[in-house]
Amino acid sequence: VPLLVLEEGGVLRRANMRDYVEALRILVSLIPPGRTTTYGALAGLLGVSPRLVGRALALNPDPIIYPCHRVVRSDGGLGGYSLGAAFKRRLLEVEGVRLEGGRVSLESILDDILGDP
DNA sequence: CATCGAACCAACC
DNA sequence: GGTTGGTTCGATG
């Protein structure tokens, strides 16, 4: 089943990008500084594909408020960033995320940002 | 360890 | 209808 949204008036509609962007804003703001999570982990929570998460994050990066730079690839690779991968790397370093050979240390990755780390 | 290919899904053409 | 991403996972060398 595709992800559905219940609108006022009782109408069900398919979730669109705006819905995903909004949901992701809430989720990424739960990632503590110095930790990261993955596109796949967020995708699992939403029940969508990791690529869709990437596309949604690319759509509305409001980098100051919603720290989408804390979302990385499952192998620790940085993944993309609308303001540039170099900037993403710098932000992570500043927050104290360990970087080894172009990847974040897997230790920083929270696989479940809802459960207690 | 590196690369390959299929599956992912809303949006855009 | 086909392509495209801030990806992933299992299979293969």
Image (spheres, coloured by chain):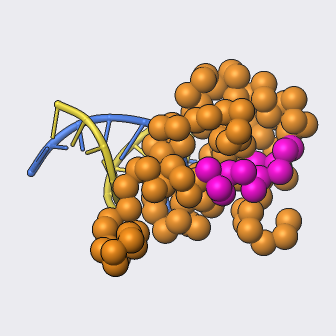
Chain colours: A orange, B yellow, C blue
A72 left or right, relative to A14: right
Q: Residue at x 41, y 50 (%)?
A: A17
Quadrant housing the C terminus of chain A = bottom right
Quadrant housing the N terminus of chain A = bottom left
A58 left or right, relative to A105: left
Q: Residue at x 49, y 68 (%)?
A: A47
- Vertical side of A78 occupied by C12: above or below: below
A21 left or right, relative to A78: left
Q: Is residue A28 magenta?
A: yes
Q: How many marks?
A: 0
Q: Residue at x 34, y 78 (%)?
A: A10
| Magenta part of the chain | A25-36
- Vertical side of A71 occupied by A3: above or below: below
- Vertical side of A5 occupied by B4: above or below: above
Q: Is residue A50 magenta?
A: no
The location of residue A34, given as percent across then percent down, is 86, 44
Foreground residue among C13 and A93: A93
Residue A116, quarter of picture: bottom right
- Vertical side of C10 occupied by A24: above or below: above
Magenta stretch mostly in which secondary structure?
loop
* Residue A78 shows in the view: no
